[in-house]
Image (tube, rainbow, N blue to C red):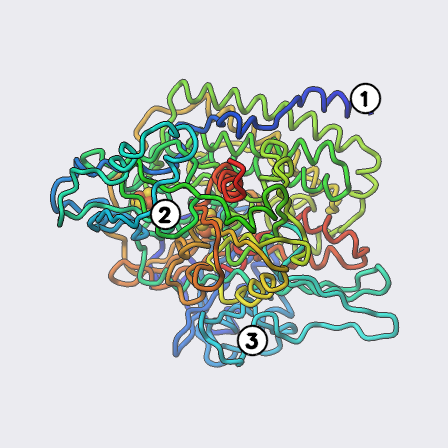
Amino acid sequence: MKPIPELKNAQAVDLEDIPVFNIEQFKQQILSHVQANCRVSVLFGIPGPNVRLYCILADDAQHLLLPFATDVGQEYPSLTPECPQVHLFEREIWEQCNVTPIGHPWLKPVRFPRKAGNTSKTKPMIGITNYFQVQGEEVHEVGVGPVHAGVIEPGHFRFQCHGENVYHLEISLGYQHRGIEKKLIGGPYPRTLLQMEAVAGDTSIGHGLAYCQILETLANLEVSARSHTIRAIALELERLANHTGDLGALAGDVAFLPTSAACGALRGDYLNISAVLCGSRLGRGLIKPGGVYFDLDAQRIQEMRKRLDKAFAGTKRTSEILFDAPSVLSRFENTGRLAASTAVEIGLVGSAARACGLKRDIRQDHPIGWFIGQNIPIALCESGDVLARARMRWLEIRNSVALIQTQLNQLPEGNITAPKITHLAGNKLVASLSEGWRGEICHVAITNSEGTFAHYKIVDPSFHNWFGLALALRGQAIFDFPLCNKSFNLSYCGFDL
Amino acid sequence: MFNIIKARWFQGKVTSAYPAKDPVLSDRYRGLPVLDTSKCPPDCRICQNICPNQAISFLTHVPTATEPPSSALSKGKKKKKSKEKRAAEVHPKVEIPGVLKPHIDLGKCLFCNECQNACPCGCIHYTQNFRVAARKPQDLVVTDGTSFSLAESLEKGRKKLFHRSLKLRVVSAGDCNACNVEVNVLNTLFFDLPRFGIQIVASPRHADGVLITGPVSENMREALLKTYDAVPGPKVVIAVGSCAITGGPFRDHPEIHNGAMDMLPIDLYVPGCPPHPMSILDGMLRLLGRL
Ligand code: SF4
Ligand code: SF4
């Protein structure tokens, strides 16, 4: 049997070098590696008469990605009972490839994919599934959504409550499904980059990067150090804006208006720094395969620095009063607590995982571009509650500002463009990771012999983390749901694709 | 307490002076495009071919007497221009019949700048002008720099009702959350939407209309229509973002509906991917006859 290839982030491997195990070996590989502190970055199937499952494990300590595969028929023994972090991946395989993971405890649709104009009342109708129900006198069910009270994306939530106490929350999504992955087959197409920037529009840079890294590997494009630095600046700016917005939203949910009002405006200040860089507040149109579209000159650097200092001073002031206020702390502390062991078990990623004390960060574990060889400060909290997740935001804001200042100071000379891509390497698999503001973004491309995408898989950090929110809410009061929800602030469309 | 007051003091006043004064946007911001098609070499199709979202088509610009006069020029700063001069600008006399000129459909455009970069003659220029909202989809088709029809106000009845108070229910229907957050940001201190009497409300029963973002995914279609139905009439519909207008970067995906245009009577189209919050605000104020 071929050994499992050991890949760096965004390194290509020949398809034929990926070992294809039988299902028992496949399972053992996953279980033993997960036992040894690896994570399942992605597990997906390629639909067809013979379904092939690919698993890519992330070995964070060794900075490696481990791809391997197996072939399955109509069904296979589910891995979820022994490895809970694959539960949603297996549901996805069931939905997309029509392969049943036998023994899966929670086999339900993930996205209810449905063609527009399909008026037949056959399944899957969005939101129609067998929800988990708690029975008993005085137990009641609260259903919320898809259209929520605020200006947020749609999703359906069902709470099983006893009085105000939530026994269980079930989250059923799929409302934002746009069929992105399926339409990538045969690509890349001219508008693929624009779609990638809109996989989760609040993470344009994160997803744009993961995609461009794939193309650069497959086309063997050299990205200049200057482009890498500008990309890293944009990535951190994205983190800053979103984290600041989240702090404000959390403050708003506990009616601490000084910070909620200030953060709303400060978030805009960070977005406007992105606009200084590339014209778009959300980083649209900055990244392109091989480099970036916009360069920085001394004057622009000066302008960005000035704005950054001002916004950071404001953020610092307003976070200090937030974490100083007893009324805030009493609501944040011990609310929505996730134990580190649970976080490991369900494969939590990003700042939500770091809030539980798990040191997981792609910038450090699987560095690429500017981050290679850098010693990135990784903030950590222990308590895993809303307070920890809020504090993580502030700590990461502080770190990101420091990073951007370094990057602006040491912008290397060089070109920002690369030659146009004419051809992609065929029969390859590339897994590309980036650390978006929510956490690990994973894109996987498989090319056919002509060098076009035979399959493309996207995993938004929210895919790993939604279940974390569901667990965090157990035993909480239902009125704390908005607070817990904001403390994760997960993407609906990134999940629904 | 003292620290809270101190922080508030340092924060100062942050609300934008708009509409009295225009905000300063990034010099790289891409707003309303201006086309100088007189420079286009015959048979050049570079921009059309490069556009990743097929937003550019080549059409003859046939001026007709029935074409509505440009409100862009009849309102606002350029008020003083004579009628003849306006007509000359809207329908330049140099038009050569039969010659095809590039037209950008802002409903499809994603403001990615590819066409401007690719044009060898410098015909296309994305300006700083954030006033891009329109009342009709055909008004979103830009042929040159001067004829863009800015959104006009609602007709008399609804204008009277909503002029000073408009409550909106926002429905995100397959949007990427960028349009959504750019709508939400209008509630922050800088834009301060409530000062114009416009408010985003939770219940459609309390709303005067819906604001739609996203291409209307099949999975959200029913919820969108139900929300619309729950709004008491007369009502307004605002489509924000190229997704809600034409499907945006996801146009023609089988799981989406290419926007809400065929589904609901849209009163205001705000193009962009995502539109700048200023574009949304400007469009709303024009719709209410406040500008
Ligand atoms: S800016 Fe608009 S019209 Fe120009 S290439 Fe991009 S999408 Fe097409
Ligand atoms: S128009 Fe663009 S920004 Fe708006 S929802 Fe669609 S893809 Fe996202």
Identify the element where label 3 is drawn.
strand
Q: Residue at x 85, y 75 (%)?
A: A136
- Going by the numbered disc 1, the residue's amino acid type is Phe
Q: Nearer the viewer, residue B132 or A275?
A: B132
Residue A137: x, y in percent? 88, 74
Q: Nearer the viewer, residue A360 or A489?
A: A489
Q: Which residue corresponds to mark 3?
A: A101
Residue neighbourhood size for the residue with mark 3, other residues' Cα within 10 Å, grouped as few (<14), some (14–19), many (≥20): many
Q: Which mark is residue A6?
A: none
The answer to whether mark 2 is within 8 Å of ligand 1 is no
Residue neighbourhood size for the residue with mark 1, other residues' Cα within 10 Å, grouped as few (<14), some (14–19), many (≥20): few
Q: Which residue corresponds to mark 1?
A: B2
Q: Which mark is residue B140?
A: 2
Q: Looking at the picture, does residue B18 appear above or below residue B97?
A: above
Specify whether A15 is left or right of A450: right
Specify whether A150 is left or right of A494: right
Residue neighbourhood size for the residue with mark 2, other residues' Cα within 10 Å, grouped as few (<14), some (14–19), many (≥20): many
Q: Looking at the picture, does residue A429 appear above or below residue B48?
A: below
Please tell me in which quadrant of the rendered image residue A326 appears.
Answer: top right
Q: Residue at x 79, y 64 (%)?
A: A167
Query: Which callout, 2 or 1, points at the residue further toward the start of the chain?
Result: 1
Where the N terminus of chain B falls, by quadrant? top right
Residue B185: x, y in percent? 58, 40
State yes or no: discs 1 and 3 in contact (Cβ < 8 Å): no
Residue B147: x, y in percent? 31, 39
Q: Residue at x 66, y 50 (%)?
A: B201
Identify the element where label 1 is drawn.
helix
